[in-house]
Amino acid sequence: MSRNISVAICLRCANFRIKNIPCCHDGKVRFPNLAEAPGLLKELLCSNSQEAKHYRQQIREYNAALAFASMGAEIKAPPGTGPYCFHIHGQIYHMVSLLSSNERNRPGYGQLYISDSSEARNRRMENIQACLHSVMEKLDVILRSINPFAESYLQMLQLMQSNPAANVKMVFMEHPDLDLRKYNASSSRTEVAAIFVGELAANRDICIYPVANSYKNISPLNQCSDPMVYPVYFLNGGCSWNSNMELVEERRSAKRVRVT
């Protein structure tokens, strides 16, 4: 897509949006307030330092290197010359890795957050050489310290190590009110996930297995999908949008309408 995109501030929800494209259905959808951005993110987005300038120029590469899940689609460039753009054919899909890689696949995505920090950074730099090692190190450190998805992968590894014969799974919840009582006692919970010994959770929850032969498709409707795919925009791992949000009707009515 062209980089010359006109943006504006929504007068109802005060968020940045693409001009002439509604973001909150004219105020009928109320989003929770965003958490305060970490100081590192503010510095990288606003500073004039060489690291910050490089980060803004290569932000897609940094995001791809640090993502917990991938974004994929059938992409075709249109014929002719002009500003860079592309066509997406069919549906955009997301994929998530298992906890551990097998012999055929190199570690990637969430798997790197259970590796040693220096080893994980080296693998990322091998895959995407356009990034600066110093910036990658800072981002890796802050994600491991404040991001609940990184914490969740590490907790799953710890539960597996303490229960080596058990069938351990981790679920990133579609909705934030997941009831842990339906799982076995050997369970723990982070801000965004439940790690448990038991059967698979239902519906669109994202389930992470210890080992399998391939990556797993995940639903874009899951509230965890965006922060897993775009961690540089969600350093805190905040989950804002979900399919259970309600429209706010101005007229008096007892009817509740879900966002679709």
Image (cartoon, rainbow, N blue to C red):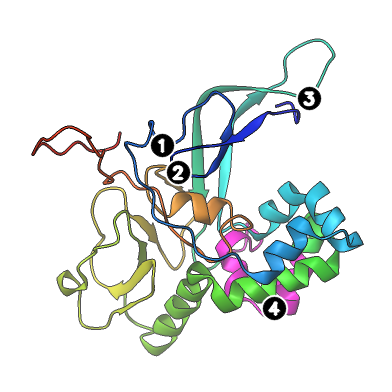
Rendering coords of residue 63 (x, y %): 67, 53
Rounded to the nearest whole Å, what is the CA distance between mark 1 and mark 3?
A: 29 Å
Badge 4 amino acid:
Ser
| Residue, disc 1 | 24
Question: Can I make out residue 215 in this image?
Answer: no
Q: Quick one: label 3 or label 4, which is nearer the N terminus?
A: 3
Pointer 1 and pointer 3: residues touching (CB < 8 Å)? no
Q: Quick one: label 1 or label 2, which is nearer the N terminus?
A: 2
Badge 1 amino acid:
Cys
| Residue, disc 2 | 13
- Asked if residue 70 is positioned above or below residue 50 in the image, the reply reads above
- Asked if residue 84 is positioned above or below residue 58 in the image, the reply reads above
Q: Residue furthest right?
A: 50
Pointer 1 and pointer 2: residues touching (CB < 8 Å)? yes
Q: Quick one: label 4 or label 2, which is nearer the N terminus?
A: 2
The front one of 180 and 96 is 180
Rounded to the nearest whole Å, what is the CA distance between mark 4 and mark 2?
A: 38 Å
Mark 2 Cα shell of 10 Å, populated few (<14), some (14-19), many (≥20) = some
In the structure shown, which secondary structural element does the residue marked by tag 1 occupy? loop
Mark 3 Cα shell of 10 Å, populated few (<14), some (14-19), many (≥20) = few
Identify the mark at residue 150; answer none if there is no mark.
Answer: none
Badge 2 amino acid:
Cys
| Residue, disc 4 | 117
Q: Is residue 106 magenta?
A: yes
Rendering coords of residue 129 (x, y %): 85, 56
Pointer 3 and pointer 4: residues touching (CB < 8 Å)? no
Residue at figure coordinates x 72%, y 47% from the top left: 60
Rounded to the nearest whole Å, what is the CA distance between mark 3 and mark 2?
A: 31 Å
Rounded to the nearest whole Å, what is the CA distance between mark 1 and mark 4?
A: 39 Å
Looking at the rendering, in which quadrant would you find the N terminus?
Answer: top right
